[in-house]
Every structure is written in C-alpha cells, then in structure tokens.
Image (cartoon, helix red, strand yellow):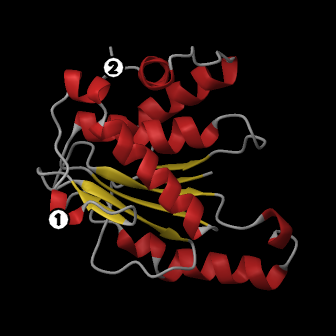
Amino acid sequence: KLLTDLYYFTRYFYNKQTGNKFVRGEHFKILSDVLEKVYTQEITRLIINIPPRFGKTELAVVNFIAKGLMINPKAKFIHTSYSDSLALENSNKVRDLVKSDAFQEVCNIKIKTDTDSKAKWYTEDGGGVYATSSGGAITGFGAGIVGYDGFGGAIIIDDPIKPDDARSAQVRDKVNNKFETTIRNRVNSRKTPIIII
C-alpha cells in the first residue's frame, strides 16, 4: 500500500516519525490521487494552487520525493523554491525520511556517504535530489532518467516567487525566464514530470 497510495504513505511515515496522527483532510486525498497520476505518467505537467499552511510541501515535496525513491531508487529529482534555505530544508527532510528506521524497515535504500549534503545527495542506486533556489544555478544534474519508460523522478518547484514579489512584473518575468531557459531544460526525458506549487 505504501507503493500505491501517497496519502497512506504520508500518514504512515508522519505517524512513525512524530508519534502523531497526520491530520486528515479531503484536499490531501484529492491531491494524493492527482500526484499518483504523476507517478504513473498520466500527468507530466501539474500546477497545484492551494493556500498556505495546508500541507502542500509535506505531501507534494517531501513525501512525493521519498515515495518516488521507494518506487525507483534510481529516480532523480530537482527541487527549487524562491528561498534557498527552504529548498535545502525540504531536501533535508526527504533525506532524513529515507534514512529513518521506519523507512529502512520497508525499503532498504542507502544514501551515498560521499554526497550526503542538503543541496545534493545520491542513493547508492544512482537516484537523488538536487535542491536550490529558483534563481540558483543547476549544473551537472538533470531530473528523470535518460531512456527510461517508467517513473524516473521529477522537477518540483515549490513557491517559485516570494509572496512579497508576486506583484512585481520584473520579478515575475525573471522567474519565468529562468524557468524557460534553465529549469525546463534540466529534464533527462520528455516524460519527466514538472510540478509547480
């Protein structure tokens, strides 16, 4: 069930890590069902619009990436946000979840010790996560797997622009240009999903 239901996956590991029950909400189930279609490649481009503090990052970044690595330890993810520290914090949460005893009990994925940083880390199978700000450099890393037909990773952009800058046409243009010229070109396959939150 962990491999087929992101909602269950999230609730299961949240309970294991915190000792608390994950707050249930109909929007979590709906969002989980949509994200499952990303894993099965029914959806390759997805925009998620939900208000702040509704658990989008927990579900669509942290648990989505961790479950993606459980599905395929070779999967490669790029995660960006307007804030470098937020992207690194999310990467760290994913890494901590994958390394947790609870995760290791059901899926023996090891993280390479020589690449075990918040910004970039790899599994021993060749998958991994590259995290940076939306304006940061993305070099030497692509999302997805070249020539692979199954799920091989994704680009996940969580809050590409600061709320305070959302009204600035100049900042919006800069972020959109970065997406068009850099981020969108970091896919290793045309089937690599791109998710914008």
**Which residue is rendered at x = 48% and y = 35% of the image?**
35
Q: Which element carries disc 2, helix, strand or loop?
A: loop
Please tell me in which quadrant of the rendered image residue 36 appears: top left
As measured in the structure, the alpha-carbon distance from the residue carrying label 2 to the one carrying label 1 is: 29 Å
**Mark 1 crowd level (few <14, some 14–19, many ≥20, 10 Å Cα):** few
Residue 107: horizontal and vertical position, in percent? 19, 28
Q: Nearer the viewer, residue 181 or 61?
A: 61
Q: Earlier in the sequence, mark 2 or mark 1?
A: 2
Residue 114's disc number = 1
Say whether residue 40 is visible: no
Q: Which amino acid, by three-letter code, is at mark 1?
A: Asp
142 relative position to 167: left or right? left
Q: Which amino acid, by three-letter code, is at mark 2?
A: Leu
Q: How many marks?
A: 2
**Which residue is rendered at x = 68% and y = 18% of the image?**
25
**Residue pointed to by mark 2:** 2
**Mark 2 crowd level (few <14, some 14–19, many ≥20, 10 Å Cα):** some
Residue 79's disc number = none
Q: Which element carries disc 1, helix, strand or loop?
A: helix
- Would you place residue 152 above or below residue 135 in this image? above
Q: Nearer the viewer, residue 125 or 13?
A: 13
Residue 158: horizontal and vertical position, in percent? 59, 55
Q: Quadrant of the N terminus?
A: top left
- Would you place residue 57 above or below residue 2 in this image? below
Residue 149: horizontal and vertical position, in percent? 20, 47
Outermost residue toward the left in this view: 125
Say whether residue 137 is visible: yes
Please tell me in which quadrant of the rendered image residue 17 appears: top left
- Would you place residue 35 above or below residue 140 in this image? above
Q: Are marks 2 and 1 in contact (CB under 8 Å)?
A: no
- Would you place residue 119 above or below residue 20 in this image? below
122 relative position to 133: left or right? left
